[in-house]
């Protein structure tokens, strides 16, 4: 993952004030071009599909496409400028991008914030790592089913902000949701016959995908995605895995590969990569998320299909 030089939020907002950008009211019924800014890559992909064909809406990302899933990010001056010029900010919510919402409120107190995860089911049924945590898991987007629900929620909120585009947003969201739910059904159907559907993951980004697909997350390597576990935690992870006999350890692209290799070798299971689509190309194809998830499905079928019963 590539990181850019950053400065403190306070400094960024001071720079913003120095160049003369000031908060201004956002009209309830927008006229002219509406600038919609998205705080995360998966939210941007989805919003781009939902607003497709609405020529008066300009959909942009707040951060670079390769930023990844930054739970904590310090705003740079250019980020603050993007926020100040946005009519609408769409965030993932659930604590993933609170810093973006807070910064937007400071520079655009009358601006509109849409929370993509609002009204989306966050329950887990198979004892995923988040079921053992007190805070909500924000990674709904890593499950096609929940991503579909997020698309519907965003379409409804955008329709209330821009009634003239409401029918188009709803139509686009329904089309996207049908494809995503069909993709999700493929996960469930093709993985149902796997001899061992118990896995370990790098952190809780795959909890919803696993839960919806009928897979059990037996353990996570990093309870905090921003830091590695200590020696005692690693010992407990290995002991737990040896008791539960998971089929494989899955990590994100470029994330925790050395640590993952060490743990997988100690347990005696394969290490494989799943992509939660937290980052990607600057100008992806419209079906980029769907193609990435189908690659994930092929990986799961290949890896779990070669494992024995636990």
Image (tube, grey):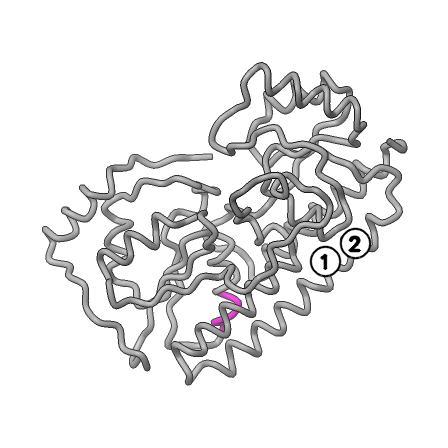
Q: Residue furthest front?
A: 134
- Mark 2 sits on what residue? 188
For numbered disc 2, what is the local secondary structure? Answer: helix
SS class, disc 1:
helix
Circle 1 crowding by C-alpha within 10 Å: few under 14, some 14–19, many from 20: many
The residue located at (81%, 27%) in the rendering is 245
Q: Using residue 232 as the reference point, say whether residue 248 is left or right of it.
A: right
Label 1: which residue? 184
Q: Position of residue 203 (x, y in %)?
A: 59, 35
Query: Is the magenta region chiefly helix, strand or loop?
Result: helix
Q: Which residues are magenta?
A: 48-52
Using the image, determine if residue 291 lies above or below residue 201: below
Q: Which mark is residue 262?
A: none
Alpha-carbon neighbours of circle 2 within 10 Å: few (<14), some, or many (≥20)?
some
Residue 6's spot in the image, x, y percent?
28, 37
Task: Give how far apart the Cα atoms at labels 1 and 2 are.
Answer: 7 Å
Q: Residue at x 45, y 47 (%)?
A: 96
Q: Is residue 288 left or right of residue 198?
A: left
Q: Using residue 108 as the reference point, say whether residue 170 is left or right of it.
A: right
Q: Residue at x 39, y 55 (%)?
A: 61
Task: Residue 170: name its quadrant.
Answer: bottom right
Determine if the magenta segment contains residue 24.
no
Asked whether disc 1 touches disc 2, contact meaning CB atoms under 8 Å apart, the reply is yes
Given residues 261 and 218, the one toward you in this image is 218
Nearer-the-camera pick, 46 or 193: 193
Q: Is residue 25 shown left or right of residue 212? A: left
Q: Quadrant of the C terminus?
A: top right
Residue 230 image offset from top left, x and y in percent: 54, 18
All told, the count of numbered labels is 2
Residue sitting nearer the eye, 27 or 236: 236
> Could you say where residue 93 lies in the image, as x and y percent from the top left?
45, 54
């Amino acid at each position: 993952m590539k990181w850019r030089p950053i400065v403190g939020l306070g400094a960024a907002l001071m720079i913003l004030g120095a160049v003369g950008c000031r908060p201004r009211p956002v009209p309830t019924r927008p006229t002219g071009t509406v600038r919609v800014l998205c705080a995360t890559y998966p939210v941007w992909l989805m919003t781009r599909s939902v607003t497709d064909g609405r020529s008066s809406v300009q959909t942009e990302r707040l951060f670079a496409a390769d930023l990844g899933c930054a739970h904590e990010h310090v705003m740079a001056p250019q980020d603050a400028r993007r926020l100040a010029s946005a009519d609408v900010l769409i965030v993932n919510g659930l604590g993933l991008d609170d810093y973006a919402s807070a910064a937007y409120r400071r520079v655009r107190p009358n601006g509109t914030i849409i929370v993509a995860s609002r009204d989306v089911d966050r329950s887990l049924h198979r004892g995923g790592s988040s079921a053992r945590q007190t805070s909500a898991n924000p990674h709904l987007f890593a499950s096609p089913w929940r991503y579909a629900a997020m698309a519907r929620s965003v379409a409804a909120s955008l329709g209330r902000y821009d009634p003239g585009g409401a029918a188009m947003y709803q139509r686009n969201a329904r089309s996207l949701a049908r494809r995503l739910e069909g993709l999700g059904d493929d996960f469930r159907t093709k993985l149902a016959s796997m001899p061992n559907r118990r896995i370990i993951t790098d952190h809780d980004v795959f909890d919803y995908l696993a839960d919806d697909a009928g897979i059990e997350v037996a353990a996570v390597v990093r309870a905090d995605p921003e830091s590695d576990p200590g020696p005692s935690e690693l010992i407990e992870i290995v002991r737990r895995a040896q008791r539960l006999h998971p089929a494989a350890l899955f990590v994100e692209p470029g994330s925790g590969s050395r640590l993952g290799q060490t743990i997988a070798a100690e347990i005696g299971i394969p290490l494989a990569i799943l992509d939660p689509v937290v980052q990607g190309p600057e100008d992806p194809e419209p079906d980029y998320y769907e193609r990435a998830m189908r690659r994930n499905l092929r990986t799961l079928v290949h890896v779990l299909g070669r494992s024995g019963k636990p």
